[in-house]
Amino acid sequence: MVVVSVSLKDESLDQLREIQRGIGLSSRSETIRYCLKTVDSQMRERKDMSGPVEGVLIVVHNSHMDSWMSVIQHRYERLVGTQLHSHLESGKCLEVMILRGDAEDVGNMIREFDRQENAEYVRFVQS
């Protein structure tokens, strides 16, 4: 097995520990492998999308003042059939969007949300 050195911010290390405890894994290495497997599975699901698709996109982000959210939503407005915005008790915002369109366009939209540092959770559930 190859040993890899990784630098993490304190917040990321706390997240890693929380995942490790929550899943019941015995080491950070096991936790990193678990996280990689989970993300790989999500990426394969998206890669397998083709043709017309529809589903629900869920995004949790830090604030309704995040301008990047509306920029992305406007760029892909042709895909959004319905949208729900809710303020959570934590001070964060929840966006739920019903998407319908070409798999490539939907995938591009999801990737744009994935790249945003303030997007804490991005998940697409295909119907």
Image (cartoon, grey):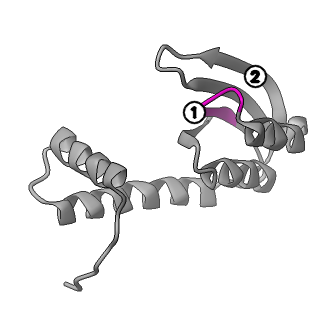
Q: Where is residue 59 in the image (x, y as percent from the top left)?
A: 60, 34
Q: Mark 1 points at which residue?
A: 62
Residue denoted by label 2: 83
- Asked which secondary structure carries label 2, the reply is strand
Which labelled disc corresponds to residue 121?
none
Q: In the image, is 106 to the left or to the right of 61?
A: right
| Of the pair 110 and 50, the residue shown nearer to us | 110
Residue 35 rendering spot, x and y as whole percentages? 34, 56
Q: In which quarter of the image is the N terminus?
A: bottom left
Whole-Å distance between the Cαs marked 2 and 1?
Answer: 18 Å
Mark 1 Cα within 10 Å, few/some/many (few <14, many 20+)? some
**Magenta residues: mostly which secondary structure?**
strand
Residue extending farthest to the left is 26
Residue beneath the point at 24% across and 42% down:
18
The tag earlier along the polypeptide, 2 or 1, is 1
Q: Where is residue 75 in the image (x, y as percent from the top left)?
A: 88, 44
